[in-house]
Amino acid sequence: MSSRITLFNKELIIYIFRSTGWIGFLYFIGLIFALPLEMLTIILNENNEYVKFENLFSSQQMIQFVLVIVIPVLLAIFLFRFLQLKQASDFIHSLPITRRNIYFHMIGTGIGFIVLPILLTGSILMLFHSAIDIERLYTMADIWSWMGITFILEAIIFSVAVLIGMVTGLSALQGLLTYVFLALPVGLFILTTANVKLLLAGFSADYYLSANMKGISPLLAATEMEKISFLSVNTVIYAVLTLLFLLISLVLYERRKLEHVSQAFVFPKIKPLFKFGLTVCMMLFTGFYFSETTGKLGWILFGYAVGSLLGYYLGEIVLQKTWRISFNLRGYVTFTVVVIVLALILKIDPIRFKSKIPEEKMISQIYIGNSPLFIDDETTDIAPTFLKEKENIEAIRLLHQQIIEKGKKVSFGELNDGQSVFLMYELKNGKRLAREYHLHNYDSYLQLLAKIYESSEYKKTVNELLNVSASDVSQIKITASGQVDKFVSITDGHQLQEAVQALSEDLNNQSLAQMTNPFGDYASIDILLNNNKSINLNWDSSYSRFSKWMEQTGQAEEARLMADDIDYILVVKTNPQIYDSISESELVQQIEQQRNRLKINTASEIETAIDHAQINWDGEYAAAFYYKDSRSVDIKSFTSDHVPGFILEHFNE
């Protein structure tokens, strides 16, 4: 009797349900706990009117996240586990059905085990919505969006797990490599940018890393499912990639040799790709680790050497399935030579990355600051300091040119030292050019930096108060600094006008030194605008015009920290590096126990100390402020060029 080839094989369907049906059932139970039961609990709660969701992904987020990233991988592993077991492989492939139909049976059933629980859960949520008035919790649109996004994420993860299963003969390795593959785009990008900055002066790793990269990896996108839009570019890309991966998996399955069970990789060409890929990743990781922890050339090179050796060794262990391997020295030496050549090419800079400065006529505007982290960050209200005036553009280009010519750039052993300057040119053609430098001779650039930072355009960009009028202000609240319960609220229209004018004059008159290193922490100023927005300022000793106005109106003593609020101050001379490795309570204890400490308790000296103290813990003199009406202690510091004379005399005796 001749065998009959069918599109639908009953024995295969039974086999699939026996081996993987429990995963679909487990998935459904998990979704029931994450959504319908959670909603039912909220509905039956008498205080449910206080419960609100951004969308359905906000309900039991952790359970949904685990289900989304685990269930598809489990399905792919158990559906194609027959490829890793000789007996199961012989049974499946002895059935009267082609490999292509076997593949479609497996994929179709796997997709069904994902879709069916989602549809059932969505139906229950729709039933709740139609029977009970819970529109404030979720809408019908929320249900359809939840079902669509959940399916898209699980489908792309499932397709990747299937693809990995086609090239490996070990189930454990299939699961591990699936998550590695999903996280690889982001991880490799982070490691590469973090290491490129070691060789390429001016390269800003933070600028590129500040971009939202979670959409690049569905694994990371699943951590913020509530922010994903169903009709978005990412979901379309995920859908296309899902079909592409499944198609590639089919081609690989049809070409796979069935005898290659229990092998790490069934296609020989993938073995060197895996081995050297792992070597590169380990090398980049250890190099990055030692650059961040030590910043020393010797340790960084040591990290590269150890990381590459470890990665190469682990790769051989996985491929040979034993830790007693024969080390292929020739392969490792070849890899090392290639890496050295690539590093030299990057260092030589054939594309002239280091020296490139846009021409003035090509520049639309420029951002300048200490960090690129706030650019394009929707979570912050801090406005980037984009400058457009010709004088500032010329000054920034000149600054950039001097940085390059003086050669004080990022280099080995200097990665975490020096003042940072970040520049980003926005060109008229819409492109951007970003550079970041760590300057060890920062003082030599102060004249140019002052010209930029003290310009009217820059100050209007960073100080919102300079862009509003007194009529926009409804209230000014001034709260004294430190452990003092004092504040003044200004609501009178005439006084608001005078206060805004005084503050604006002080902001316009601030020097670069006063902007970057404020001294005299008097009070915090909260300016409430008519549109319910607020502006926050710190009243320090540079606000001379405002200080004078507060004294003239008789409000200074009730609004700011005064000598009468302080019981005494203890000052010690210390090494500024101690601040990085000690807590506030430990520092207070050290100050109190030091024999040569200076105790300040006269009103005039306390007032002088308040005027010269800074909040930052980086001065050569540490000071503990003790208040009359509070048991709390504040730690401040004095720098060597702003320390009062009587403190200097005490420690120079």
Image (tube, helix red, strand yellow):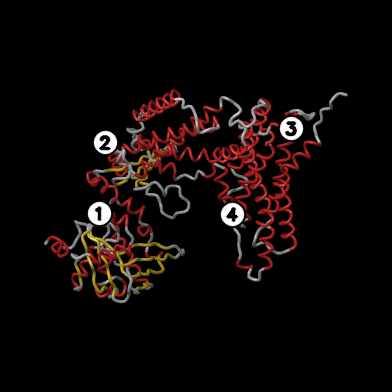
Quarter the N terminus occupies: top right
Q: How many marks?
A: 4
The residues tagged by marks 2 and 1 sit, at their Cα atoms, a distance apart of: 25 Å
The residues tagged by marks 1 and 3 sit, at their Cα atoms, a distance apart of: 74 Å
Residue at numbered disc 1: 513
Residue type at tag 4: Met
Residue type at tag 2: Gly
Q: Secondary structure at mark 2?
A: loop
Image height check: is 568 above or below 286?
below
Residue 210: x and y in percent read 44, 45
Mark nearest the camera among 1 and 3 is 3
Residue at numbered disc 3: 102
Quarter the C terminus occupies: bottom left
Residue at numbered disc 2: 407
The residues tagged by marks 2 and 4 sit, at their Cα atoms, a distance apart of: 50 Å
CB contact under 8 Å: marks 4 and 3: no
Q: Earlier in the sequence, mark 4 or mark 1?
A: 4
Residue ranking furthest to the left: 653
The residues tagged by marks 4 and 1 sit, at their Cα atoms, a distance apart of: 48 Å
Residue type at tag 3: Ile
- Write down the quadrant of residue 338 in the picture: top left
Image height check: is 651 above or below 565?
above
Q: Secondary structure at mark 3?
A: helix
**Badge 3 local density, few (<14 within 10 Å), some, or many (20+)?**
many
